[in-house]
Amino acid sequence: MSALKMTKQERQAVFSLSTILGLRMLGLFMVLPVFSLYAHQLHGATPALIGIAMGIYGLSQAFFQIPLGALSDRIGRKGAYALIFMLQAAVFFVLGGLHSLVHAAIAYAVILFCYGGGFGIMPSFSADYFGTRHMGANYGALLTAWGVAGLAGPLLAAYVNDVTGSFSGALPVVACMLLIATVLPLTSRKPARSTILVSERLEHISHVERSLQAAK
């Protein structure tokens, strides 16, 4: 086996983290792209207020990366991600029953809070598992899951709207999915340290061999 290849445990860990990120992002991408359409159906909605709400979402995403990151340092990445899944599930359960722009805006802000915080935690989650080993490949796989969710979420939302005439039909299903997904970060396992150390030593030996060959 090439020294540069991931071990089986590392591949399993990358798949686990990618699944965690992908499922979390699926819910976000189901509701965020259609918010402006959905908001026009809410009580008290005006173009100006909808624009303000969208701006608040961006701020909530940016500002809460630091507090959730700090929380993950205290309770662990797994606990923080489980909390994020539970918060998102709770919001999706109630979102379909909200008819006021203010209430819907608060719900969306919580979703964006989870998005920003979770995305800020994931690099540390990956670093806890792998350090700097295969950083490009590891995070590339995570961002691929993010991209797949970004493609599937709006398509699923559009399909539900075409079939039922409303975007809210899929919300309870997504809420149940997120609630079940809460167990994923709690059961995820990082690669055994001994396995990583052996692989790193093999990588170092391979690098030395290539350097010696280049020097000849």
Image (cartoon, rainbow, N blue to C red):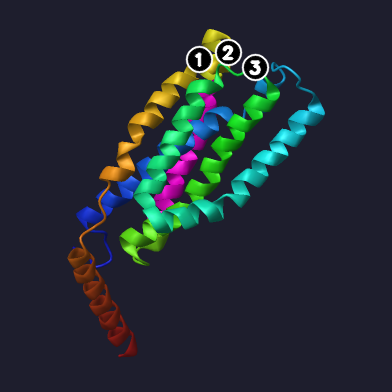
Q: Which of marks 1 and 3 is in front?
A: 3
Q: Mark 2 or mark 3, which has the lower sequence index?
A: 3
**Image quadrant occupied by the C terminus:** bottom left
Find residue 70 and report its horizontal and vertical position in percent: 48, 57
Callout 3: few (<14), some (14-19), or many (20+) C-alpha neighbours within 10 Å? Answer: some
Query: Residue at position x 47%, y 35% from top?
Result: 87
Q: Is mark 2 on a helix, strand or loop?
A: loop
Query: Residue at position x 58%, y 13% from top?
Result: 166
Query: Residue at position x 42%, y 54% from top?
Result: 72
The CA span between labels 1 and 2 is: 6 Å
Callout 2: few (<14), some (14-19), or many (20+) C-alpha neighbours within 10 Å? Answer: some
Residue that label 3 marks: 99
The CA span between labels 1 and 3 is: 15 Å
Q: Main secondary structure of the magenta part?
A: helix
Amino acid residing under circle 2? Ser
Residue 158 falls inside the magenta stretch: no
- Range covered by the magenta-colored residues: 138-157
Name the residue at the front extreme.
74
Using the image as rendered, state which of residue 200 and residue 206 is in the foreground. 200
Contact between marks 1 and 2 (CB within 8 A): the answer is yes
Name the image quarter holding residue 127. bottom left
Residue that label 1 marks: 169
Q: Mark 1 or mark 3, which has the lower sequence index?
A: 3
Name the image quarter holding residue 109. top right
Q: Is mark 3 on a helix, strand or loop?
A: loop
Task: Residue 123: tell me if it is visible.
Answer: yes
Specify whether 57 is left or right of 117. Answer: right
Amino acid residing under circle 3? His
